[in-house]
Image (tube, grey):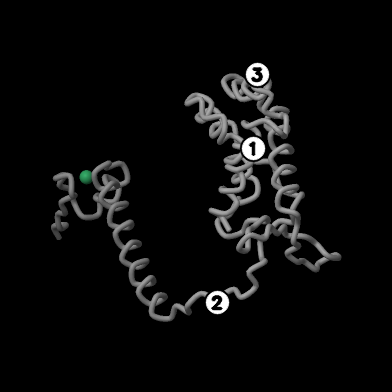
Amino acid sequence: MKKRKAICVCGFEARIDNMPKHQKSCVLFHTQKVKKEYEAEITRLNEKIKVLSKHAIPAQHITNNNINIVVYGTEELPEAYDMLKKLCQKGNFEHCVPRYVEMKHFPIPGKGNIRFIDDKLQIFSEKMPGEYEWVDVNKDTELENITERNMDEIINRYGNTNITNFHATWVEKHQVANLNSENFKTVAKNVENTIRKNS
Ligand SMILES: [Zn+2]
């Protein structure tokens, strides 16, 4: 009895019982096979998505607004080199500290650990282990402290690196570290505006 012939996708003709041997090494056959498998998988996943979205439950509203807020004074140090470099390249030294404060104290929008409520300045504190509260602080003193502390921190961390050292030079040359200088007051005001903007 004459065996039936088969044709491969590549055009190769052979007896049907010889075809598997050819297709084992046929690149075109293999490519088509993989493509079909992918297409089938995509169809299957799309069906699954349809089913799942029908049964989707709306995300639970988190009522505890304090979740993810880091206690004031225990922040992680931000990776601020790129940001500071850009400001220094533009000569925008007055915004180095405010932007650094923003990265450090407002790492997640709406989850900052210092805020203004009207004209009252508050910091997020740990009253006792596991118990947190917003505490009123003296606005002028705290704005001076946060500005001074972060100015020092920037100089310590980035004062010896390429371009960001311009900030350290600016601080030194204009005595910006002097709390009574106009420049210090400008930086502190910018810090205040940054906190207000994020409150
Ligand atoms: Zn083939």
Residue identifier under label 3: 173
Residue identifier under label 1: 185
Say above or below: 41 vs 191.
below
Disc 2 C-beta below 8 A from ligand 1: no
Say above or below: 12 vs 170.
below
- Residue 118 position, x and y percent, is 60, 63
- Label 1 and label 3: CA atoms lie apart by 16 Å
Q: Residue at x 70, y 45 (%)?
A: 76
- Residue 64 position, x and y percent, is 65, 72
| Of the image marks 3 and 2, the number of the one nearer the N terminus | 2
Q: Residue at x 74, y 38 (%)?
A: 149
Which amino acid does the dot numbered 1 rest on?
Lys
Residue identifier under label 2: 60
- Label 2 and label 1: CA atoms lie apart by 44 Å
- Residue 161 position, x and y percent, is 63, 21
Quarter that holds the C terminus: bottom right
Q: Quadrant of residue 12?
A: top left
